[in-house]
Amino acid sequence: MSEAAHCDPYFESDTMATASAARMNAPASAERALPPADLAAAMLAMGKRARAAARVIALADAETKTAALKAAAAAVRAARAEILAANAADVARAKADGMTGSFLDRLTLTPERIEVMAEGIEAVAGLPDPVGKVTERWTRPNGMIIERVRTPLGVIGVIYESRPNVTADAAALCLRSGNAVILRGGSDSLASSGAIHKAFVAGIAAAGLPEDAVQFVNTVDRAAVGHMLAGLDGTVDVIVPRGGKSLVARVQSDARVPVFSHLDGIVHVFVDKAADLDMAKTVVLNAKMRRTGICGAAETLLVDRAVAETHLKPLVAMLIDAGCEVRGDAVVQAVDPRVEAAADSDWDTEYLDAILAVKVVDGLDAAIAHIEQHGSHHTDCIVTQDTQAAERFLAEVDSAIVLHNASTQFADGGEFGFGAEIGIATGRMHARGPVGAEQLTSFKYRIHGSGQTRP
């Protein structure tokens, strides 16, 4: 069966579907695979159960969802040993497969990271419930009162790669926003994500909400992704991809349901002619080196030619001394013999590693033009003391997040006060930037009349 094909009526046995679904949600195994017929039936069963659970979650009151999220956070803390053991197996397998340092950083869990994960769930629990919020209200000349009210999207499919913490973030945000979710993590983090999922659903079940509201696709078979992209017979309302360029490209190409695009983060920092050097050094170092494997990490540094003589060498030396490989144009290479020559492809590369492309540009216009040509509309920053230059940059750079005098690593839902995020949407429809609980809702109109009829 094609990965993008709909689940055929051929796989209609309820008994087989139930058995397959049970196996799908069993404790994670690194090498779990089902025959095609069983997989199709299991995926369709998951979709049907998610649709039924979505109705329950959509109608749950704010207090119930808050209690469930707090219970899920407590369950994740209580399962720390099991999660770390599962993660150790995933990391050992990744090392044996020769995975890079940045990949291992995204994959690895520690007691501290598990605590941050639990705190993230609690932060989402503390958010205002978006469901039922009246965003607009007006009265028509005929006396009718019209309200625009936030509603859940329904069933969300989240497809992600090596970050096991996405399991908790996505589950928490979907639950807070009244949605059911089907999670499909990467094969490299299958055991870790499965252990986190097991703890999370134990928590929400203890609070009286259905476990089927948060389901996990426990298989390495990539055909499962194809079934999700096909919509599971109309039970999936939206797909959220969280991963590299190839994953997002496949989702955008094959999905038959709406997609929240999360493209690669080719993130720029532009050091303007009016930049304070000390501030520029602080911002650039943090933007690149705090964590190199996240989508908000800077990948290209642009320096105004007007300050190249004073700013360029200190910035380049600082980066190289901090362990960052610098690839630059001829001007950049001239200031430090350790700089590698940049190829044309470097301006279009998301390294997710301690590598930075550096280029000297002729002022603000050239910087904006470079970002427009090579950026991914994710996150871009200007460092300057010139308010007018900053305002132009913020207005003209067409990215989901633009910053003035602040590190690009603030491109994170938690830092925005969203509690967590399901991804950074780089498209222009429905949601843009960090996708939190409020962005996972739609709306409907409620009309209150007193017998009005239309002439």
Image (tube, helix red, strand yellow):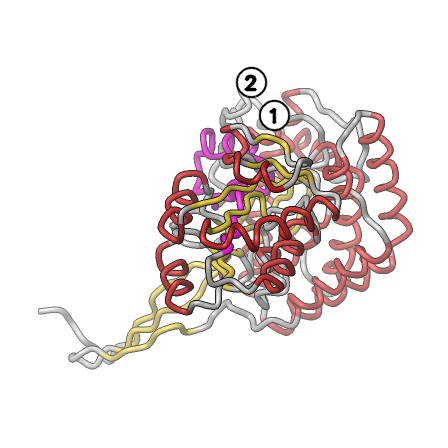
Q: Secondary structure at mark 1?
A: helix
Against 110, is 217 above or below? above
From which residue to which does the magenta span run? 242-271
Residue at screen point 76% across, 30% down: 99
Against 270, is 123 above or below? below
| Left or right of 332 in this view: 430 | left
Residue 85 in the image, given as x and y percentages of width and height = 90, 43
Kind of residue at badge 1: Ala
Q: Is residue 167 visible to the viewer in this orientation of the structure?
A: no
Residue 134 in the image, given as x and y percentages of width and height = 41, 74
Q: Quadrant of residue 390?
A: bottom left
Residues 275 and 193: in front is 275
Residue at screen point 35% across, 69% down: 148
The tag earlier along the polypeptide, 2 or 1, is 2
Q: How many marks?
A: 2
Residue 23 in the image, given as x and y percentages of width and height = 75, 34
Q: Which residue is mark 2?
A: 1
Q: Which residue is mark 1?
A: 223
Cβ atoms under marks 2 and 1 closer than 8 Å: yes
Q: Quadrant of residue 455?
A: bottom left
Q: Secondary structure at mark 2?
A: loop
- Residue 46 forms part of the magenta stretch: no
Residue 286 in the image, given as x and y percentages of width and height = 66, 56
Q: Nearer the viewer, mark 2 or mark 1?
A: 1
